[in-house]
Image: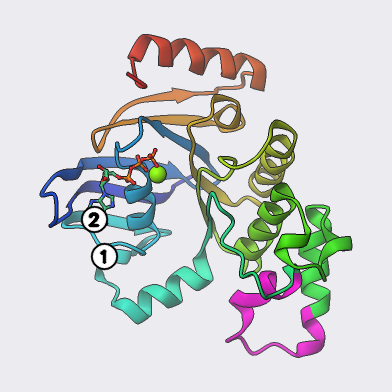
């Protein structure tokens, strides 16, 4: 299988600090892959994800998603590309408070030529996959964090994207909700073939992935591959490598 995401010699610095945040960052995400990016706070993980998602600009280098060079797209083309190909999930869910879960999930479809009677059907379909079909008419403050995150995942995939980018998606969740949400990501990846690139600080969350990319000072410093290990063994492997590599120094 080919690559879904290719990041080549990416550099970025912020004018305010002048600090180089991405430093010739180069890596690929295989089509159908489920990758975690781990690294210390401030190492540039969120910046990397935002640049890949076309939310933030970069200074030099190149990014290709599904053979499309996003660096040559203008603002409108990028927004269009993202809407149809990339779903994004955030740590704090980013749901709109005054909309129900169903309305939040349907937001990405607002410009599409879809018969309104279809809206109920498509939102039910996606919600059933993640076990939130009975609470779709509640508002975000009326459901738990884990349920909000599952609604945010539904919203991210309602347009059937090829790629999902997630920035610490379990960062605000307790261990039970973390497991539920990670099982949702696993399902997206294994059953729907969606390529997932996720940033996390959490070893347990990372152990659901096929590969962990280690990141330090805007550079990739290592790759840990699961290679058929069960989740528990992969967890132990990541733990031992992180202890060796001083990644959280
Ligand atoms: N808009 C901005 N202007 C200037 N500096 C910024 C901006 N956004 C981020 N930075 C700086 O860039 C560096 C990388 O930030 P980034 O948010 O990508 O780190 P991170 O690896 O996601 O950290 P964390 O694990 O804490 O979320 C940090 O030093 C941060 O202060
Ligand atoms: Mg971050």
Mark 1 sits near ligand 1, with its Cβ under 8 Å away: no
Above-or-below relation of 181 to 102:
above
Assess disc 2: are there few (<14), some (14-19) or many (≥20) residues with their C-alpha within 10 Å of its C-alpha.
Answer: some
**Residue sitting at 35 percent across and 21 percent down?**
247
**Residue sitting at 35 percent across and 34 percent down?**
41
**Residue sitting at 24 percent across and 55 percent down?**
62
Quadrant of the image containing the C terminus: top left
Circles 2, 1 touching at the beta carbon (< 8 Å)? yes
Front-most of 54 and 103? 103
Provide the residue span drawn in magenta: 102-119
Front-most of 69 and 147? 147
Q: Which residue lies furthest to the right in this view?
A: 134
Report the side of 229 relative to 67 (left or right).
right
Q: Is 114 within the magenta?
A: yes
Q: Is 219 within the magenta?
A: no
Front-most of 190 and 238? 238
Q: Quadrant of ligand 2?
A: top left
Name the mark on residue 62: 2
**Residue sitting at 75 percent across and 34 percent down?**
176
Mark 2 sits near ligand 1, with its Cβ under 8 Å away: no
Query: Residue 169 appears at what percent x and percent y?
Result: 57, 45
The kind of secondary structure element at disc 2 is: strand
Disc 1 marks which residue? Answer: 71
Report the side of 166 relative to 52 (left or right).
right
Assess disc 1: are there few (<14), some (14-19) or many (≥20) residues with their C-alpha within 10 Å of its C-alpha.
Answer: some
Q: How far is disc 2 from disc 1 in space, using C-alphas?
A: 6 Å
């Amino acid at each position: 299988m080919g690559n879904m995401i290719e990041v080549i010699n990416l550099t970025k610095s912020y004018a305010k600090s002048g600090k180089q945040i991405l430093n010739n960052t180069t890596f690929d995400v295989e089509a159908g892959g489920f990758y975690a990016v781990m690294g210390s706070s401030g190492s540039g993980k969120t910046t990397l994800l935002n640049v890949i998602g076309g939310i933030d600009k970069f200074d030099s280098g190149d990014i290709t998603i599904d053979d499309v060079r996003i660096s040559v797209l203008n603002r409108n083309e990028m927004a269009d590309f993202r809407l149809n190909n990339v779903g994004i999930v955030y740590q704090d869910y980013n749901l709109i408070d005054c909309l129900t879960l169903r309305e939040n999930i349907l937001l990405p479809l607002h410009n599409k030529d879809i018969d309104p009677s279809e809206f109920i059907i498509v939102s039910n379909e996606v919600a059933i996959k993640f076990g939130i079909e009975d609470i779709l008419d509640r508002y975000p403050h009326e459901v738990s964090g884990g349920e909000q995150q599952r609604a945010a995942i539904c919203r991210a995939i309602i347009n059937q994207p090829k790629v999902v980018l997630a920035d610490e998606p379990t960062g605000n969740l307790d261990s039970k909700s973390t497991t539920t949400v990670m099982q949702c990501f696993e399902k997206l990846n294994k059953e729907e073939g969606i390529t997932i690139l996720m940033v996390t600080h959490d070893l347990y969350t990372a152990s659901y992935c096929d590969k962990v990319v280690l990141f330090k000072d805007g550079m990739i410093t290592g790759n840990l591959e699961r290679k058929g290990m069960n989740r528990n063994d992969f967890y132990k492997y990541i733990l031992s490598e992180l202890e060796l590599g001083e990644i959280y120094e």
